Image (spheres, coloured by chain):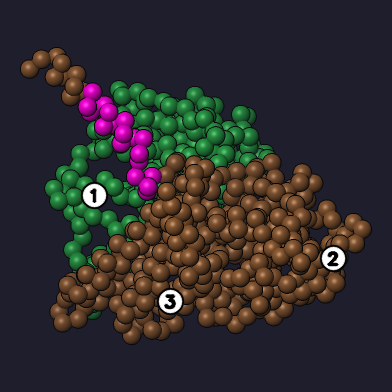
């Protein structure tokens, strides 16, 4: 027993402690993130939960919900307090979206689009004048919509046909968009239009279009299977005039911005699907612990236990993929492949979880009196929007191909 | 008048958590269990912040007695609009023995130190349901008390109070400085908005105080013999004189039902 032995042991422990603290588990949150999550959880349970069923049935987002989202600071999470925002981080946004999705994925998607697409575009690309005009309103009372998809161009986004013709110091935009979320309530639209169709995607430009622009027509909202409280409308542009100063970023760079934003938005959708799966699961397991058949809780049947444990594992894996993609992005490291994985996987997990939950609930799972069937309907869009599952997989494959190209 | 209000906030097991008694019957399980601010304390904080917004008082100071984690409770109060916090550090055995008498001695001492005009507390805590701290604090300070307040309005240096009592509503007028305890219907507490949470985290104005053992913590301790869970409820039988008491919280849904039967 010598001093050197002691110091080795001590040194070993110190190094272990150092490693442990430098690499905390993914489910580690800063105090700020923890407090935000708790606050949103409480708010969602008390202010949104009672309205979910009604909003779904009427396919209408309650104005009170929208107003309280702004009041709580949930619509400007990453916007600087100088512009009325919360001044928090991307990961906080992800946690907020996850918590909202546990209660209502429609509300979560409204919050997600605002924060990860609209706000980010303005913050990254806006001129001081544009930021001055829009950021304050986006944090406090105005919803934004992101307009890329058209009837003839979904996955093939850059084949969009909406065109913008230059006249002196303004553009005239003609065309239409489809599947535009938040359109019913949006005050500003970020429209991707092509200024030079002969240049292909290099003509795509991002235009800021105010709701009251003459010639802008918001069509009737779609009657959807799920996410019904989130309005999804076609838009028509009939010779609308947009001043040159309303171009966000540079002419012809719109395609870059779209891809860039969607890479980040992807993680937001992953968080939404994750919250959806968790929320559905949280409603179901208590039922299985109460429901008794053949003299025991249905939870106690081994068949059930195995299924429940399997789903719980999938949700945990989805969570780790999502959180890691978010942390990678925050750390400024490459994250596109991981973001695709997170979105693809979370959407699949949401589909599996909701389907299983209905089965575990039995007959009552199949009725509208219980919230489970809504989660089942809501999850399906996860594999479709903001990049279909097939697109995610192809993107991942491109990265994998590059990785092995040595 | 200093225009300063002291608001007591207690860290308790969250109201939604299912309470479990420890296997050795020495208390309830608290390790790893979700804790939050006592709901009646939230109402007290809300009332204090409202008074400040109406410019009737100048400063809201949130006070909590307990271990390190009590600082989270103070932070929530800051996020709701309190100006600064005081954490009275009580941990270990002292914390286990901490009850209304000890807390009211601490609050009385702080009130004098901070030159408080008003002390706002929740009417009771949902863990011990004592409903004593407000009353004891007032007695120690020899201040008037307005308990079970469902309406508070300041009129010059007096306070108009509506109290919820068994017979209905009682209207009283008391002098300041005074102690008020908040009842359920006094107000609906605001949510801490995300910007407020950010601000509260920048706020480094929570002081740490160490209470005087001799005068505050070691006096009037009540020995705890045993903690037992109530028996599981049996199926209903018709008994004349059965009494049912509800504890109904903000959501309007009954959270705890305590059934005691008087068999005549």
Q: Is residue A94 above or below residue A174?
A: above
Q: How many marks?
A: 3
Q: Is residue B128 left or right of residue B54?
A: left
Q: Specify whether disc 2 shares its chain with disc 1.
A: no
Residue B103 location, quadrant? top left
Q: Specify whether disc 3 shares its chain with disc 2.
A: yes
Residue placed at 70% from the left, 49% from the top? A125
Which quarter shows the N terminus of chain B?
top right
Q: Chain of mark 3?
A: A
Residue placed at 51% from the left, 67% from the top? A391
Q: Which mark is residue B28?
A: 1
Any magenta on residue A25?
A: yes
The chain drawn brown is chain what? A
**Residue on which the image places disc 2:** A165
Q: Which span of residues is magenta-colored?
A: A11-28
What is the C-alpha distance between the residues marked 1 and 3?
Answer: 39 Å
From the image, state the color of chain B.
Answer: green
**Residue on which the image places disc 3:** A376
Element marked by disc 1 = loop
């Amino acid at each position: 027993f010598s001093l050197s032995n002691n110091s080795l042991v001590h040194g070993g422990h110190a190094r272990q402690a150092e490693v442990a603290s430098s690499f905390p588990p993914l489910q580690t949150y800063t105090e700020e993130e923890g407090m935000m999550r708790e606050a949103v959880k409480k708010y969602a349970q008390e202010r949104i939960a009672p309205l979910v069923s009604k909003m779904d049935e009427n396919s209408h987002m309650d104005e009170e919900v929208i107003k309280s989202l702004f009041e709580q600071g949930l619509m400007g999470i990453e916007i600087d307090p100088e512009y009325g925002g919360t001044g928090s981080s991307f990961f906080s946004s992800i946690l907020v979206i996850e918590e909202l999705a546990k209660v209502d994925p429609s509300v979560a998607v409204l919050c997600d689009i605002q924060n990860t697409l609209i706000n980010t575009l303005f913050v990254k690309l806006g001129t001081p004048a544009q930021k001055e005009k829009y950021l304050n309103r986006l944090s406090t009372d105005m919803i934004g919509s992101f307009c890329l998809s058209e009837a003839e161009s979904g996955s093939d986004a850059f084949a969009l046909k909406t065109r913008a013709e230059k006249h002196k110091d303004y553009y005239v935009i003609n065309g239409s968009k489809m599947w535009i979320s938040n359109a019913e309530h949006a005050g500003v639209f970020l429209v991707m239009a092509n200024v030079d169709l002969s240049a292909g995607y290099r003509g795509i430009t991002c235009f800021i279009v105010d709701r009251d622009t003459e010639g802008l027509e918001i069509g009737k909202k779609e009657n959807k299977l799920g996410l019904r409280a989130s309005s999804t409308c076609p838009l028509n542009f009939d010779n609308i005039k947009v001043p040159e100063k309303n171009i966000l970023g540079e002419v012809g760079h719109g395609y870059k911005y779209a891809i860039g934003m969607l890479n980040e938005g992807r993680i937001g959708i992953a968080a939404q699907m994750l919250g959806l799966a968790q929320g559905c699961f949280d409603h179901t397991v208590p039922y299985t612990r109460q429901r008794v058949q053949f003299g025991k809780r249905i939870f106690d049947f081994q068949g059930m236990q195995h299924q429940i444990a399997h789903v719980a594992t999938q949700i945990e894996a989805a969570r780790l993929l999502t959180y890691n993609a978010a942390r990678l992005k925050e750390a400024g490291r490459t994250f596109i492949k991981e973001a695709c994985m997170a979105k693809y996987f979370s959407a699949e997990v949401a589909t599996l979880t909701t389907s299983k939950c209905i089965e575990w609930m039995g007959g009552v799972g199949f009725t509208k009196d219980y919230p489970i069937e809504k989660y089942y309907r809501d999850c399906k869009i996860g594999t479709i929007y903001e990049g279909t599952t097939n697109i995610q997989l192809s993107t991942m494959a491109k990265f994998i191909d590059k990785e092995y190209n040595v | 008048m200093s225009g300063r209000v002291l608001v007591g906030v207690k860290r308790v097991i969250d109201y939604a958590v299912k309470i479990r008694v420890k296997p050795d019957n020495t208390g309830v399980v608290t390790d790893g269990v979700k804790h939050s601010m006592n709901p009646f304390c939230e109402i007290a904080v809300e009332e204090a912040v409202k008074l400040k917004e109406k410019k009737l008082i100048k400063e809201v100071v949130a006070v909590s007695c307990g271990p390190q984690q009590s600082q989270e409770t103070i932070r929530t109060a800051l996020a709701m609009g309190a100006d600064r916090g005081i954490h009275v550090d009580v941990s270990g055995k002292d914390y286990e023995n901490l009850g209304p008498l000890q807390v009211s001695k601490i609050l009385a001492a702080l009130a004098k130190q901070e030159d408080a005009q008003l002390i706002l507390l929740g009417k009771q805590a949902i863990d011990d349901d004592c409903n004593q701290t407000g009353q004891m604090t007032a007695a120690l300070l020899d201040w008037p008390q307005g308990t079970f307040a469902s309406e508070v309005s300041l009129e010059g240096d007096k306070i108009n109070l509506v109290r919820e009592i068994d017979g209905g509503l009682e209207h009283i007028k008391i002098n300041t400085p005074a102690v008020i305890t908040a009842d359920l219907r006094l107000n609906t507490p605001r949510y801490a908005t995300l910007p407020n949470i950010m601000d509260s985290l920048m706020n480094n104005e929570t002081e740490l105080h160490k209470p005087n053992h001799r005068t505050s913590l070691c006096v009037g301790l009540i020995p705890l013999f045993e903690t037992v869970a109530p028996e599981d409820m049996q199926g209903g039988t018709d008994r004349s004189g059965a009494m049912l008491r509800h504890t109904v919280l903000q959501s309007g849904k009954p959270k705890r039902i305590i059934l005691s039967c008087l068999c005549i």
